[in-house]
Amino acid sequence: MKSDTHNNQNFIIYTIGIFASYFYFGILQEKITRGKYEVEAIDEQGNKTVTVHHFTFALTFVCSQCIINYITAKIALLIWPQNENSKTLRLHYASVSVTYVLAMIASNMALQWVPYPTQVIAKSAKPIPVLILGVLVGRKSYALRKYLFVFIIVLGVVLFMLKENTKSTVESSEIGVGELLLILSLIMDGLVGAIQERIRAETKPSGLQMMLQQNGWSSIFVIIIVVLSGEIFNFIEFAKIFPQIYFYFLAVGAASAIGQLFLFSMVSEFGPLVLSIVTTTRKFFTVLGSVILFGNVLTSRQWVGTVLVFFGLFLDAFYAKGPSKKK
């Protein structure tokens, strides 16, 4: 009973930490990636002209987060030393980092072909590949009802997030490049969870150790990509004009690092499936909170989605008798 109480307390702390830090992260990310960067000048006739630049350095943005996350984990381990489990194969950490980076790249690239709401809705289905690949690759075994509860939660989130008057800009019903990239991103998300599950089951590393290793390997991979693609050099030129971007990067990196401290602690103690459900419902509660605060009216479809999310979460919590068995 004492252990269950301790686990429940940790779960609540991690969930609140993830919700708060990534809410702030989302605001900063929006400011950086969708903000307008203006340069004023006076032409030969004495008229003021304004040139608008847009942020197009997604890889550099991701790279900075990985590096800050790695440094944060390194400092945390110096403050709270832990016995490193050398049994974890480096191949496992390298693999999870590759899939993690590919998931982020595919998700960001998809925005060139699909609107942002479509990306958000698609990524809301993340618990499904995490669940399926956790069984196929991560060697997990879940009760049949677990599949049902996860499906109910995901369906509720999708119904809630779906725009009322969304119309496809593509006349054909065929799957396009953007949709394929989103599918790839979801598969990579599932593989990330599955490999994390293998690492967790085989060597039981702490959250800080997982955070350090995953971000360390991810930093190496993304640095290679941004250098070979030349994006880093274009970013440096951009930063010369808008040096405030460095402050924005530090701020969003801090939010990301704090969030990952909670995130990897949850993965270490509760597993990647639980984390994927928490991060998915975070989007739902963020939008629901804004609706309540600003007095927006929910549509009947959104009310159905709301009921489904809470119903699924209630059933999952009610029937959660303990950790699932390994195969």
Image (cartoon, rainbow, N blue to C red):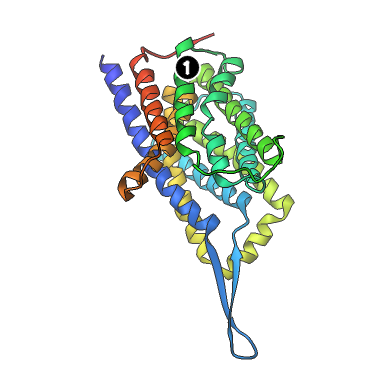
Name the side, left or right, on which 163 lies relative to 290.
right
Q: Which residue is mark 1?
A: 148
293 vs 73, left or right, is left
Instruction: Kindly identify the residue that appears in the image at 51 percent across and 26 percent down.
Output: 127
Q: Position of residue 166 (x, y in %)?
A: 55, 43
Q: Horizontal placement of 210 versus 133: left or right?
A: left
Q: Quadrant of the C terminus?
A: top right
| Residue 82, visible in the rendered structure | no
At 40% from the left edge and 26% from the top edge, which residue is drawn? 308
Secondary element at image label 1: helix
Residue type at tag 1: Leu
Question: Residue placed at 36% from the left, 38% from the top?
Answer: 17
Q: Residue 206 occupies which quadrant of the picture?
A: top left
In the image, residue 142 above or below residue 72: above
| Residue 312 position by quadrant | top left
Of the pair 216 and 274, the residue shown nearer to us: 274
